[in-house]
C-alpha cells in the first residue's frame, strides 16, 4: 500500500518554484498480485504528473500577477496644471498643486502620497505657472535623499523652459504638449526599464492604489487605460463621458453632452464591475483625467501620430480609441476635481462633515506633507463643532462651526467663524511684534476680537482686525476689490494672502 500524503497545492507550487518536487513517486510496494501493483504505480505516476502540471500552472499565474504589479517598471508624470484662472485669486502667487487643502496639506500631496502608498517611486512633476512655492514644498516634503529608503526612485520637478530654435520658444500648450516637450526623458538611462507611463493631475482629491490600475491595464493588454467614475443623470452633463463595449473597450467620447446626446452615452457599468443596482443608478462613466500609456505607444502618439495635438483628453485619446486598444478602468470611490473656487471651498468643508466623504486619516495609506515641527494647538475656553483645527494654532474664547483652520492660525476673543476655510500662516509673529503692531494701531496676523466671519476663504498671512464682519449679506456673486484686500467668487468671499482688513470693516 502507498502511504504517502499529498502536499497542498500551494506547498507544491512553492517547491516547484524552488526547483524541488514534493511529488516525486515512492517505489511501489507489491501487495497481492503484480498486476494490481502495476496499476497502482501507473495511477500514482498519473496523479504526480497532474499535480506537477497544476503546480506549474499556479506558479506561472502567480508570477504573471507579480509581474503585472511590478511598480519598478512604472513612472508617474504629475501635471502641475495651467494658469489656474478658475482658482484665482488663490493661484495669484502659487501653482494650482501648491494650493493648501485640509488645513495642513497641499493639493500636490494627494498624487504624491498615492504614488508612495502604491509603491511607485519614479515621479516627474511638470510645472509652468508660479512654481516657486510648489518647488519649495516638494523639496522639503519629498527629499528622499534624507534618510528615506526610496530604492532607485526619484522625484524631479521639471519646469517649462525655452530652448534654441523656433519650437523651443513655446510654453506648454496643454497636457500632451507638456509631456511631449520632455519626452526625451523616456530615452534616458533612468527610463530603460520603464514599460508604462502613469499620467496624473495635480489638482484632484482622492485616495487610490495606482498599482491596481496598472495591473488591470497590463492583464487586459491595453495600450491606454483611462480611469473613470460612474455618474448618475444629475451630474452626467457636467463631465466628459465615454462609451464602452461589452469588453470595457472605449469606443466613443462626448464632452458634456445634453439631451439625446447624453442618453446616447449610457453604458452598462456592470461590465466594469459595478453592482447591478448601482449600475442602474449610474449609467454613465466620466474620465478622471488619470491615464496609463504603454511607453512606446505614448512616444509614438506624441512624436509621430499626433505631433501637433496639445491635449490628451480632448485630442489624442479620442482619436487613438479608433485605432488602438483603449480600456476603461472603474474607480468607484470619492474623487473631486479642485478646479474652481466653489469646488475648493466645498471640498474643504466636506472634510469637516460627520462622517466625512473623504478623510486624510488612514493609517494604512497616509497622506504625506512637509514636516513643520509645530507644537500642538492651544485652545482656551472655546466652542468648536464639526471643524478641523490644524497644529500650531492659538484659539482664545472663540466659536468655530463647520470650518477648517490651517496651521499657525491665531483667532482672538469673541470671534465667530462659520463655514470658513482658513489657510493659516507661513510664520509666527512674536508676542513683542504683535504688541507693537497693536500699540501702533496696526493689525497683526490672524483674526482680531469681536469679529464675525461666514462663508469665506481666508488666504495665508491675512490680517483681519477687530469688530470686522465678513458675511456678504447682500449676496454679491462676483466682485474684485483688490485694494480692499478681498474678492468674491461664486458668492464666496476670499481674503487675499498678506492682505489687511481694517478694524470695523463690513463686507
Image (cartoon, rainbow, N blue to C red):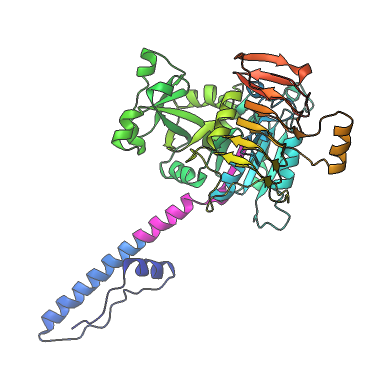
Where 404 sits versus 147, above or below?
above
Residue 429 as seen in the image, left or right of residue 209: right
Residue 198, image x, y percentages: 56, 39
Task: Give the residue displayed 47% in from the left and 20% down from the top.
Answer: 238
Residue 52 sits in which quadrant? bottom left
Q: Which quadrant holds the C terminus? A: top right
Give the percent coordinates (x, y) of residue 433. 87, 39
Q: Which residues are magenta?
A: 57-78
Instruction: Give the answer, above or below, for where 326 lies relative to 315.
Output: below
**In-front residue for pair 294/231:** 231
Which of the 4 quarters of the picture holds residue 477? Answer: top right
Chief secondary structure of the magenta portion: helix
* Residue 307: % across, % down: 61, 24
Q: Could you tell me which residue is drawn at 17 percent across and 77 percent down?
A: 40
Q: Is residue 240 above or below residue 369?
A: above
Residue 370 position in % (x across, y down)? 70, 46
Is residue 169 visible to us here?
yes
Instruction: Work out which quarter of the rendered image holds the N terminus and state it.
Output: bottom left
Count of numbered circles on the image: 0
Relative horizontal placement of residue 52, taking residue 69 as reference (left or right): left
Q: Is residue 107 magenta?
A: no
Q: Residue furthest left?
A: 33
Amino acid at each position: 500500500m502507498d502511504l504517502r500524503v499529498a502536499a497542498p497545492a500551494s506547498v507544491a507550487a512553492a517547491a516547484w518554484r524552488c526547483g524541488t518536487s514534493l511529488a516525486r513517486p515512492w517505489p511501489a510496494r507489491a501487495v497481492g498480485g503484480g498486476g494490481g501493483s502495476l496499476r497502482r504505480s501507473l495511477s500514482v505516476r498519473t496523479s504526480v504528473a497532474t499535480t506537477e502540471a497544476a503546480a506549474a500552472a499556479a506558479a506561472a499565474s502567480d508570477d504573471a500577477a507579480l509581474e503585472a504589479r511590478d511598480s519598478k517598471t512604472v513612472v508617474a508624470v504629475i501635471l502641475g496644471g495651467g494658469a489656474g484662472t478658475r482658482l484665482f485669486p488663490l493661484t495669484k502667487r502659487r501653482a494650482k498643486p501648491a494650493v493648501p487643502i485640509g488645513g495642513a496639506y497641499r493639493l500636490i500631496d494627494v498624487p504624491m502620497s498615492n504614488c508612495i502608498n502604491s509603491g511607485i517611486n519614479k515621479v516627474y512633476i511638470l510645472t509652468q505657472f508660479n512654481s516657486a512655492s510648489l518647488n519649495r514644498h516638494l523639496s522639503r516634503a519629498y527629499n528622499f535623499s534624507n534618510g528615506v529608503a526610496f530604492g532607485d526612485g526619484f522625484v524631479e520637478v521639471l519646469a517649462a523652459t525655452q530652448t534654441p530654435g523656433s519650437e523651443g520658444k513655446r510654453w506648454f500648450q496643454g497636457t500632451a504638449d507638456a509631456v511631449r516637450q520632455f519626452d526625451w526623458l523616456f530615452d534616458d538611462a533612468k527610463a530603460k526599464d520603464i514599460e508604462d507611463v502613469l499620467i496624473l493631475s495635480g489638482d484632484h482629491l482622492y485616495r487610490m492604489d495606482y498599482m491596481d490600475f496598472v495591473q488591470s491595464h497590463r492583464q487586459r493588454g491595453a495600450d491606454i487605460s483611462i480611469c473613470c467614475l460612474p455618474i448618475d443623470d444629475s451630474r452626467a452633463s457636467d463631465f466628459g463621458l465615454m462609451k464602452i463595449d461589452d469588453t470595457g473597450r472605449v469606443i466613443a467620447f462626448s464632452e458634456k453632452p445634453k439631451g439625446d446626446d447624453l442618453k446616447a452615452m449610457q453604458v452598462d457599468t456592470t461590465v466594469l464591475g459595478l453592482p447591478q443596482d448601482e449600475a442602474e443608478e449610474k449609467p454613465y462613466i466620466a474620465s478622471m483625467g488619470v491615464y496609463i500609456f504603454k511607453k512606446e505607444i505614448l512616444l509614438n502618439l506624441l512624436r509621430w501620430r499626433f505631433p501637433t495635438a496639445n491635449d490628451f483628453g480632448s485630442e489624442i485619446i479620442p482619436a487613438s480609441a479608433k485605432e488602438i486598444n483603449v480600456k476603461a478602468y472603474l474607480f468607484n470611490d470619492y474623487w473631486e476635481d479642485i478646479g474652481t473656487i466653489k469646488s475648493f471651498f466645498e471640498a474643504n468643508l466636506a472634510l469637516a462633515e460627520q462622517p466625512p466623504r473623504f478623510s486624510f486619516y488612514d493609517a494604512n495609506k497616509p497622506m504625506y506633507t512637509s514636516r513643520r515641527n509645530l507644537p500642538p494647538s492651544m485652545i482656551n475656553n472655546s466652542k468648536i463643532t464639526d471643524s478641523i483645527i490644524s497644529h500650531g494654532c492659538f484659539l482664545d474664547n472663540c466659536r468655530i462651526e463647520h470650518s477648517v483652520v490651517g496651521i499657525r492660525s491665531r483667532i482672538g476673543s469673541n470671534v465667530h467663524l462659520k463655514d470658513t476655510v482658513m489657510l493659516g500662516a507661513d510664520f509666527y509673529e512674536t508676542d513683542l511684534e504683535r504688541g507693537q503692531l497693536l500699540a501702533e494701531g496696526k493689525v497683526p496676523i490672524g483674526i482680531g476680537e469681536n469679529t464675525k466671519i461666514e462663508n469665506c476663504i481666508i488666504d495665508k498671512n491675512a490680517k483681519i482686525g477687530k469688530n470686522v464682519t465678513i458675511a456678504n449679506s447682500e449676496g454679491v456673486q462676483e466682485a474684485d476689490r483688490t485694494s480692499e484686500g478681498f474678492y468674491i467668487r461664486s458668492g464666496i468671499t476670499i481674503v487675499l494672502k498678506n492682505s489687511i482688513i481694517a478694524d470695523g470693516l463690513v463686507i
